[in-house]
């Protein structure tokens, strides 16, 4: 099982790097006068560190992470707060989501996803036997942490990441068999909050309006959605051919990040899209098999948490570019351009592989 998960992980990473080499040509030429700047940058600062992180994390016994779950959570929360220090936070496109520490730049939200899963897995595993007897008061500390993080992310602003983290928490609560009425109540409250934030924020309201009526402002708020649909529609069954996308030539915004799925659809068609989604399905299926077959609840919750992270981000990204969901700026795991997300997620997969190597031991 560990070998299958490793192979699928690196197949997705390779697929993403290949697509960035094509989707990023126009942007690379425009921004840096080099056809393959984004390809080489992703290779050097994304793929290679990710491979190194995977090799290291897959060799660290997963039980060690339980000892450091709380300190890691506190450190990652501190990183999120440091974003608002003017000399440390990096702003781009109206949002401050990057942290610069001594020439090392990264996205603290990606680090927090990882540490939150570790902490929540530890918290749930300690209470696993009495999980059905949990009350709202007993999970209040977790809800306070989620509320703090949500507030910080919305202030950046990064509502999409807040939704992902909330989704991971609800998924893990569900798998932990926490009473369904509590989960339903939390989802209802979260939905109302997201809806309220979308209405009071002009740019979020524009995205919501574009989702509800894509033809309302085709040159404005609905532009990215319509161009993405054109790309996927143009690709048809087999695509126009690798490297032959027209939408990546300055027509489709964010062709190597938010919208790379549309470029895949245009160049490789429904066959390429189907193959990519099949890789994600296989990967998460094998991960849930590992989670199901281990008696170590901490290990099971970690694997389930990482699997839910992948599922939720794929669902949001593909749904947005396909017009099934509003745009939130969430990237496609392993595929989209971005070093922090790739390194952190691949490191998490290293832990999953370490668990997969040992789950047959049936640790109690």
Image (cartoon, grey):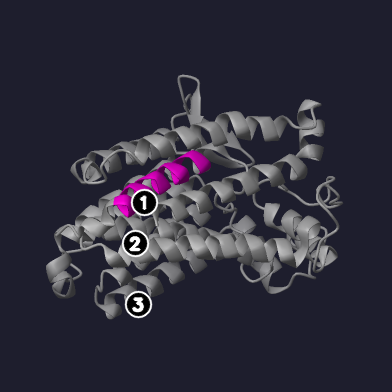
For marks 2 and 1, give the CA distance: 9 Å
Q: Which residue is mark 2?
A: 290
What secondary structure is marked by label 3? Answer: helix
CA distance separating discs 2 and 3: 27 Å
Which quadrant would the N terminus be assigned to in this image?
bottom left
Q: Nearer the viewer, residue 61 or 345?
A: 61
Q: Is residue 192 above or below residue 330?
A: below
Q: Which tag is nearer the camera, tag 2 or tag 3?
A: 2
* On screen, residue 134 above or below 122: below
Looking at the rendered image, the disc whose residue lies closer to the viewer, 1 or 3, is 1
What numbered label is drawn on residue 184?
3
The mark that comes first in sequence, 2 or 3, is: 3
> Pointers 2 and 1 in contact (CB under 8 A)?
yes
Q: Is residue 13 visible?
A: yes
What crowding class fits label 1: few (fewer than 14 Cα within 10 Å), some (14-19), or many (20 or more)? many
User: Would residue 343 be counted in the magenta stretch?
Assistant: yes
Does 95 sit above or below residue 273?
above
Tell me where residue 63 appears, x and y as whole percent.
21, 46
Q: Which residues are magenta?
A: 342-357
Quick one: SS at disc 1? helix
Whether residue 158 is visible to the viewer of this picture, yes or no, is no
């Amino acid at each position: 099982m560990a070998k299958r998960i490793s192979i699928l992980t690196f197949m997705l990473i390779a697929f993403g790097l290949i697509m960035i080499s094509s989707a990023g040509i126009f942007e690379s030429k425009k921004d840096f006068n080099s056809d393959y700047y984004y390809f080489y940058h992703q290779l050097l600062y994304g793929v290679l560190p990710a491979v190194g992180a995977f090799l290291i994390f897959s060799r660290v016994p997963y039980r060690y992470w339980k000892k450091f779950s709380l300190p890691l959570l506190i450190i990652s929360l501190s990183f999120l707060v440091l974003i608002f220090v003017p000399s440390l936070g990096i702003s781009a496109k109206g949002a401050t989501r990057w942290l610069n520490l001594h020439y090392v730049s990264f996205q603290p939200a990606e680090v927090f996803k990882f540490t939150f899963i570790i902490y929540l897995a530890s918290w749930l595993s300690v209470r696993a036997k009495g999980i059905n007897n949990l009350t709202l008061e007993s999970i209040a500390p977790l809800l306070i942490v989620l509320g703090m993080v949500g507030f910080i992310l919305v202030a950046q602003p990064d509502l999409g990441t807040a939704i992902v983290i909330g989704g991971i928490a609800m998924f893990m609560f569900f798998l932990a068999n926490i009473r369904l009425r509590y989960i339903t109540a939390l989802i209802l409250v979260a939905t109302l909050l997201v809806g309220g934030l979308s209405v009071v924020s002009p740019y979020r309201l524009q995205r919501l309006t574009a989702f509800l009526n894509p033809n309302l402002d085709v040159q404005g708020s609905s532009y990215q959605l319509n161009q993405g649909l054109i790309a996927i529609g143009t690709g048809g069954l087999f695509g126009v051919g690798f490297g032959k996308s027209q939408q990546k030539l300055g027509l489709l915004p964010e062709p190597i990040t938010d919208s790379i799925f549309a470029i895949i659809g245009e160049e490789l068609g429904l066959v390429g899209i189907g193959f990519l989604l099949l890789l994600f399905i296989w990967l998460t299926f094998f991960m849930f098999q590992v989670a199901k077959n281990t008696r170590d609840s901490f290990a099971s919750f970690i694997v389930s948490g990482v699997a839910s992270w992948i599922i939720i981000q794929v669902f949001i990204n593909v749904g947005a570019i396909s017009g099934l969901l509003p745009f939130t700026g969430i990237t496609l795991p392993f595929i989209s351009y971005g070093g922090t997300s790739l390194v952190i997620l691949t490191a998490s997969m290293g832990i999953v592989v370490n668990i997969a190597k040992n789950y047959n031991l049936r640790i109690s």
